[in-house]
Image: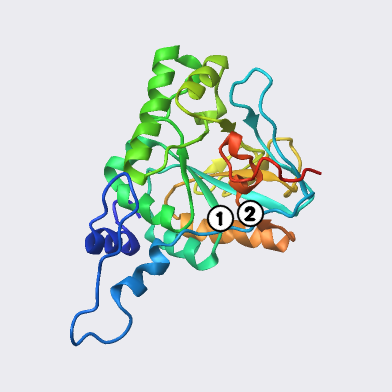
Amino acid sequence: MRGKTPVIAMVAAGVLGLAAGGWPVLTAAAQPGDSGPSMRTQLASVLGDHQWATPKPGSWTMPQPSPDGLPPVIDHIETQDRVVFLTIDDGYTYDSEFVNLVRKEKVPILTFLTSTYIKGQGQYFWAMRNAGSPMENHTVTHPNMATLGAEAQKKEICDSSDAIQKQYGRRPQIFRPPFGSFNKTTKQVAKECGIKSILLWSAEFYNGTTGPKVGFNGFARGDGGKGFKPGDIILMHYRKGLAQEFQMILGWIRQAGFKPAAVQNYLPESLGGNAPAKAAHT
């Protein structure tokens, strides 16, 4: 729901006094006469990092650096596993029910945050971060990057990374250009801003809107096929009603015999992921 700060974020911010640019420090101590778990214990689950399952050695082919030294463009993962990767863009609508759902279902998500929205609901994305979703770069104002000159593109990417790092304590290493539009200049300036890879998508769930030839809340593959394929990177957006729509796509994924996985665990560290460089390939 627009403008409503989630309870998780309010508790974390109010009790701990969240400081931008780093993890909050738990200092609450039990007071005389207190009963039940201490505040430290109560907040442990809110503030703890999530460790998502890593792929089995030999079950996937690790994406490789680009020969030109620029961030490579990735739109799917070559894998034998029946996994898909859920990514959510923008951030202009806030739904506290969605944060609670993600935490309850323990679903890995990658957020591509348009950093201008930090000003309105920075705490909302603290809650998403603490539910296990890293904040990656989706520019400051969501322009069509291929229409901009080098300096304007660099400002969009670098300023967004600066803002996200200041607010959430980690500098983005993966970039998603708005509308999937980019050129060689985009890749060059992205590298200068610390970006290691550009992540597109192989399918889109048009949650909360109507997609071409698939209708409202429709699902479409970029290759024109049907259903899910192993290694799909699925695009969604932070829109009104996201919690219910997320339950919808989770149902589809599970009914098809797939499960969501953390795409960062399938990317090498050199491309902004978590996979060790020596991890086995297929």
Q: Amino acid at mark 1?
A: Pro
Give the position of the C terminus as an image quadrant.
top right
Local SS, label 2: loop
Q: CA distance from mark 2 to mark 1?
A: 6 Å
Earlier residue among tags 2 and 1: 1
Q: Quadrant of residue 47?
A: bottom left
Q: Which residue is mark 2?
A: 261
Q: Is residue 28 shown above or below 170?
A: below
Local SS, label 1: loop
- Identify the colour scheme used: rainbow
Q: Is residue 196 shown above or below 152?
A: below
Q: Amino acid at mark 2?
A: Ala
Give the position of the N terminus as an image quadrant.
bottom left
The residue under the point 53% across, 17% down is 188
The residue under the point 25% across, 61% down is 16
Mark on residue 108?
1
Q: Badge 2: how crowded within 10 Å, few (<14), some, or many (20+)?
A: many
Name the residue furthest front: 278
The front one of 246 and 7 is 7
The residue under the point 65% across, 55% down is 54
Q: Is residue 257 rendered to the left or right of residue 13?
A: right
Q: Is residue 124 rendered to the left or right of residue 17?
A: right
The residue under the point 38% across, 56% down is 127
Q: Could you tell me residue 138's position as x and y percent? A: 46, 34
The answer to the question of whether label 2 and label 1 lie on touching residues, with beta carbons closer than 8 A, is yes
Name the residue furthest left: 32
